[in-house]
Image (spheres, rainbow, N blue to C red):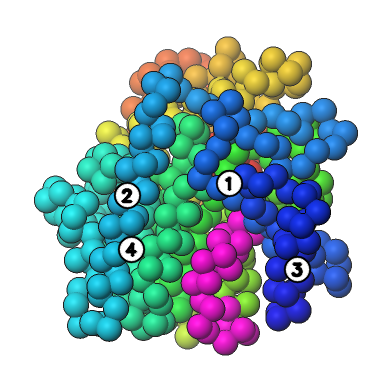
Amino acid sequence: MQVLTQMTSETYKFDLSIGILPLKRRGAISYDSSDQTALYIRMLDVRVRSQVGFEPERRGSHPYLGVDFRTLHSRAESAGSIPARRIRRLFSFQRHLLSSRLLRGAPHLNPLHILDEDYCGQAKCMLEKVGSWNFDIFLFDRLTNGNSLVFLTFHLLSQYGLIELFQLDMVKVRRFLVLVQEDYHNQNPYHNAVHAADVTQAMHCYLREPKLAQSLTSFDILLGLLAAATHDLDHPGVNQPFLIKTNHYLAALYRNTSVLENHHWRSAVGLLRETELFSHLPAEDSLSIERQLGSLILATDISRQNEYLSRFRTHLDENDLNLGNASHRHFVLQMALKCADICNPCRPWELSKQWSEKVTEEFFHQGDIEKKLKLEISPLCDSEANTIASVQIGFMTYVVEPLFAEWARFSDTRLSQTMLGHLGLNKASWSTMEPEASGSSEDGESDPARSSEEPSSRALTQGSPES
């Protein structure tokens, strides 16, 4: 571990000294000498970016290497709105930094006091009900000036007592969360920091379920919250097949296997190391956190959905899940994160509908790009052949329902029944908007979803690493 860390540091300095990396960017990649696969990749922009785009991470012969994914889903905004928002966040962070320093040496004080200046009364009231399945993350994001992921995750880490228990430096925690939030692309209609905050809130709801609350350790809870917050880190807004067919370097780096999931994980590891969040822990503990974090994030790969679901179903059939066993607890955390990642159809209609519209918008954006590049249009990405309703009905039927039915078998609680109830109502609502799908077009429902590609693409939009 020390050798790898040292190698990463030396490589970074060497690159800067010979001028390989642009001065406006920071980055480092180290490799595990045993198999030459990427162990750690960190690509973080300095907060100053060119208004016309960003420097490609690498240059090469790949025809679409220079595609600026950050601008794929850009919306019409005033030229000064983005810099102004970043300036507000910077000042907000500086205030939190000062407050955190004042709190050092006074552990008896409630660490949430550092949020008082930026939290309005409504946001505070919402956090008091952060465990409610009806939690409106869109409203909370507005009340926190677009900082929902930072505030919600910090609140949960504090509420569980993890900051004090693991002796985390609040300044480092704050910096880590700010960088995590900034590394999500807010231009993406769906895969952005608000989605990450929503998944983190859902994970919190699952962690409170009786079976988990009675069995999970503080370490498990820490991993679950960090994985939820970082599970789609630096998502480009396009799916894995798109990266593969455009010969993007990430596809080559990860050998066309769980490309996005691997990138999310390695990006998260990069931020953990950059902020030195766990530098006070023994090296083997830090490495264990990184590896288990990766195991959780990689489980969100929708292409492995059947693998995880079959294993989960077998455990339930044989009634052999032992939550006193660390490996079994970790597997349950994987399933919880998978549920949190695609739980949008199980939310109340007012929330679920918004997510459905956003995820389909992102799909259709990719389809438009593929048309312009004269590439084969990915399944569910053709706005002329699909509707929001048809996409949602197929996704609910073939991906969401099977997963949440098994989760309800594992955790037969009021929350599970509530989620299944919303799922049924939401599916019925979409069916009324898609007369063909609910009538004789049973083909329309099963066609896109029947093949293994449908779940892949569908889940990909929904926030899984495939997307």
Q: Is 282 within the magenta?
A: yes
- 111 relative position to 16: left or right: left
The foreground one among 267 and 375 is: 267
Q: What is the x, y in percent for residue 204?
A: 35, 62
Task: Please say if the residues under marks 4 and 3 sit with CB atoms less than 8 Å apart.
Answer: no
Magenta residues, start to end:
266-286
Q: In this view, does 285 lie above or below 295?
A: below
- Amino acid under label 4? Leu
Badge 3, how many Cα within 10 Å: few under 14, some, many 20+?
Answer: some
Residue 10: assigned label = 3
- Residue kind at label 2, given as amino acid type: Phe
Residue 324 placement (x, y as % from top left): 47, 85
Q: Name the residue under label 1.
A: 45
| Location of residue 60 (image quadrant) | top right
The residue positioned 52% from the left and 41% from the top of the image is 48
Image quadrant in which the N terminus is located: bottom right
Does 166 appear above or below 266?
Answer: below
Q: In this view, does 210 lie to the left or right of 447?
A: left
Q: Is residue 379 visible?
A: yes
Q: Which of 171 and 338 is in front in this view?
A: 171
Crowding near the residue tagged with mark 2, few <14, some 14–19, many ≥20 C-alpha atoms within 10 Å: few
Placement of the C terminus among the 4 image quadrants = top right
Amino acid type of disc 3? Glu
Q: Which of 447 and 184 is in front in this view?
A: 184
Q: Where is residue 163 in the image (x, y as percent from the top left)?
A: 35, 76
**Residue hosting label 2:** 91
Calculate the distance from the C-alpha at mark 1 to the C-alpha at mark 2.
19 Å
